[in-house]
Image (spheres, rainbow, N blue to C red):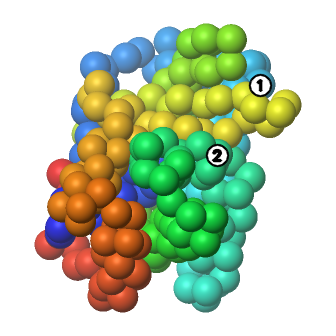
């Protein structure tokens, strides 16, 4: 898988749930301790928000009675409800956002969201019954929160640790980043987008052209599964 597309897939396939990434294993914890920290975390608005997000995503992925188009529609709704796509999109494009015309900004955001949806559609067959549990939540600043979570695997292997950065803006919570093994996926995406723009003389048109091309890329095979 090309680095740009792989990173975009990770930001949002992992960002929505992280079911398909081997990730960083969590040290084994006593089930009672996990349950206790989970109960405490979901009593907070932000912990409950992320748990609900994960539960909704699993329900869509596991539902084999809906069409691919219906599944994409449901994911689009989850994204709109739970992710601050404007904040993420503007961050990963950096200064080029201000240099872009209103028309370029509009096309970029449309392509950005479309690539998110495509990433899910290409990878849903990899779901094998993983579970999702929020294990902690804490304020990071006056408007940001960090929510810890883990993905449990049906084969009994160590859970995968995923941290979510959630921002409250205008009274609404929204995911703005996902951190795996200390690596910010939004920062990684920003670096890759910056490299593409630089290779194209600092113009956003080259990035838009690549994003259009990615939308035409056939679904990835399991051989390309990251991790």
Side of 18 relative to 87 (left or right): left
The one of 2 and 41 positioned closer to us in this rendering:
2
The one of 56 and 3 positioned closer to us in this rendering:
3
In the displayed orientation, state which residue is furthest to the left: 223
The one of 223 and 98 positioned closer to us in this rendering:
98
Side of 94 relative to 113 (left or right): left
Where residue 79 appears, as percent x and y from the top left, is 64, 57
At 67% from the left and 39% from the top, the residue drawn is: 174
Report the disc number at residue 45: 1
Choose the circle earlier in sequence order: 1 or 2. Answer: 1
Residue 174 at least partly seen:
yes
Where residue 209 appears, as percent x and y from the top left, is 35, 78
Q: For numbered disc 2, what is the local secondary structure?
A: loop
According to the picture, the residue beneath numbered tag 2 turns out to be 84
At 39% from the left and 64% from the top, the residue drawn is: 204
Side of 15 relative to 83 (left or right): left
Where residue 53 appears, as percent x and y from the top left, is 65, 46
Where residue 183 appears, as percent x and y from the top left, is 29, 31
The one of 85 and 206 positioned closer to us in this rendering:
206
Side of 125 relative to 134 (left or right): left
Q: Give the answer, above or below, for where 105 lies relative to 66.
A: above
At 18% from the left and 69% from the top, the residue drawn is: 1
The label nearer to you, 1 versus 2, is 2
Q: Give the answer, above or below, for where 100 lies relative to 90.
A: below
Q: Residues within 10 Å of mark 1 (few under 14, many from 20)?
A: few
At 44% from the left and 37% from the top, the residue drawn is: 178
User: For the residues marked 1 and 2, what is the alpha-carbon distance in whole angstroms?
Assistant: 17 Å
């Amino acid at each position: 898988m090309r680095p740009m597309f792989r990173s975009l897939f990770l930001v949002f396939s992992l960002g929505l749930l992280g079911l398909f990434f081997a990730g960083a294993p969590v040290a084994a914890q006593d089930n009672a301790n996990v349950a206790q920290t989970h109960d405490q975390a979901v009593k907070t608005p932000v912990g409950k928000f992320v748990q609900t997000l994960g539960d909704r995503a699993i329900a869509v992925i596991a539902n084999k009675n809906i069409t691919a188009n219906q599944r994409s529609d449901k994911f689009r709704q989850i994204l709109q409800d739970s992710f601050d796509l404007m904040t993420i999109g503007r961050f990963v494009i950096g200064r080029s956002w201000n240099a872009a015309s209103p028309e370029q900004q509009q096309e970029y955001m449309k392509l950005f969201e479309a690539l998110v949806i495509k990433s899910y559609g290409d990878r849903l067959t990899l779901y094998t019954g993983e579970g999702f549990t929020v294990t902690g939540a804490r304020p990071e600043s006056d408007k940001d929160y960090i929510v810890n979570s883990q993905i449990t695997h049906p084969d009994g292997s160590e859970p995968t640790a995923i941290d979510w950065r959630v921002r409250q803006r205008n009274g609404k919570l929204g995911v703005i980043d996902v951190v795996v093994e200390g690596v910010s996926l939004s920062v990684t995406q920003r670096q890759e987008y910056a490299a593409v723009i630089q290779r194209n003389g600092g113009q956003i048109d080259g990035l838009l052209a690549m994003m259009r091309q990615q939308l035409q890329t056939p679904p990835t095979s399991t051989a390309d599964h990251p991790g």
